[in-house]
Image: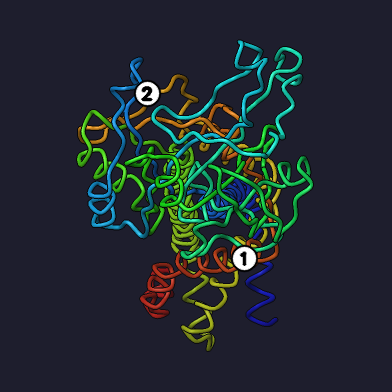
Amino acid sequence: MSVAARGIRNTFRNKVRGSAVVLVLAVVVGLTLSMLVANEAVAARLASVREQLDTTITAMPAFSENAEEMSLLNAEQLEQVRGLDHVATANGTVQGMLELPKTEEEKAGGPRIALGAPNGAKGTTDLESAVDGTKMGAPEGMKFPVQLAGTDGTLNGRGEALDILDGTALAAGDTRGAVISDQLAEKNGLAVGDTFKAFEETFTVVGIAAAGEEFDGVGVVMLAATVMELGDVDGYNSIVAEADDVDHLEAVSAAMGELFGDTVEITSESESALSATKGLETVDRITWLGFLICLLCAAVIVFFTLALTVRERRKEVGVLKAIGGTTRGVIAQFGIEAVTLVLVATVLGLGVTLMTSNLIADVLVSTNTPAAESGADGMVAGGGRVVKMAGPGGEEPKSAADLIGEVTAGLGGDTLALGVLSALGIALLGSVVPAWLIARVRPAEVLRGE
């Protein structure tokens, strides 16, 4: 009989003990694979969440009931932000509004709504707003102004990159150029290359961008210098900075808070996403550590099982050596027993993995995910407040749990292959000391004892 056949047959020579060891080992191997599967699922979700992170940070004057007390940010402060560590870019933005010239009825007090940032630019235009007031419950005939933003030409008023559908973004020399939303272009029948009036000047449409919202989140975008000049504004309503990396987002927020103090609020839409990544990073470490611990436990089980078997079968080992069996051959036989034991346990453990991997991932993610927070106030960074900024359309920012969503752990081919390799590693690791015990058995001593 070959060494391999003898090793496989001897695995369950003691059926009760062999079955018990396999069942215990199956649970441990199953948990080992569950930790591995959960780790890979969490790692994939972590990478997905990090891709969604926006590294934009906005500084704007702290709110005051008296608009005159809300001073604008200046060019010197903008340069100070640009000089901070880990700031990739920083640009000033000017908010404002454009409205149709008042009719005689409106001058006499007809229905009209005034919007715009405090101390923002205000001017006239021949553009009609694309906002449908009836959807907001506004009185019939109420006219809405057109949202105006002065930026570097590539961002909207919230510091988000413009989604250009036609034409191009603004270049540095486009002092009488503008990007308008697709809703505004449709409402006024404009295309790239057409012109419109604003601040009693003629502007050319160089690009059309996606509005992104039902109520138009873009409006009209001009260069900040142009809006400041024509709107008679001597500062910025906000400074939008871009961190050079997601990992530096909090540090940049804190540095900007220390720079501006209590008079400026530092806002970021990625606060919840940062909390989500921290929770997932914790789960990633826990599942990897759990995988290693379970792997070690399985190896210990194999070790004690084989060590006990070698001690009980010391006479058999001595006889095998006495009739010509080599130490290497006997070690190979016991090694095959270990591999057989672990492989059978691995097959059974796959059932444990399928039943527990999603449960483990869900429990760990839910217990390490910050609860949703309400209200505007956030953490304090230096002297300035860091607050959570509402999402598009005034929606509350997503919580960490919403951003993570459901983490689904699936047993793929790569994971299964790694699991089988781990099982073989368990068998080899658990066989080291038993092999050493076998090598120490001397046939003459065993037979003399008989």
Examine the rendering and report whether any part of residue 374 can be seen: yes
Name the quadrant containing residue 124: top right
Q: Is residue 65 above or below residue 25?
A: above
Residue 420, numbered label: 1
Give the residue at x 72% y 12%. Answer: 139
Query: CB of mark 1 within 8 Å of CB of mark 2?
Result: no
The one nearer the camera, 95 or 369, is 95
**Amino acid carrying mark 2 in the image:** Asp
Question: In the image, is residue 245 above or below residue 364?
Answer: below
The vertical placement of 164 against 125, above or below, is below
* Residue farthest along the front direction in this orientation: 104
User: Which of the two discs, 1 and 2, sits closer to the camera?
Assistant: 2
User: Number of marks in the image?
Assistant: 2
- Rounded to the nearest angstrom, the CA distance separating label 1 from label 2 is 50 Å
Question: Reading the chain from its start, which is encountered first: label 1 or label 2?
Answer: 2
Nearer the observer, 263 or 253: 263
Near-viewer residue (185 or 159)? 185
Question: Dot 1 lies on which element?
Answer: helix
Q: What percent of the width, then of the height, locates residue 155? A: 52, 51
The answer to which of 374 and 124 lies nearer the viewer is 124
- Which numbered disc covers residue 159? none
Q: In the image, residue 265 lies at what x, y percent?
A: 33, 32
Q: Which residue is mark 2?
A: 377
Give, as a three-letter code, the residue at label 1: Val
Residue at (69% x, 67% y) in the render:
9
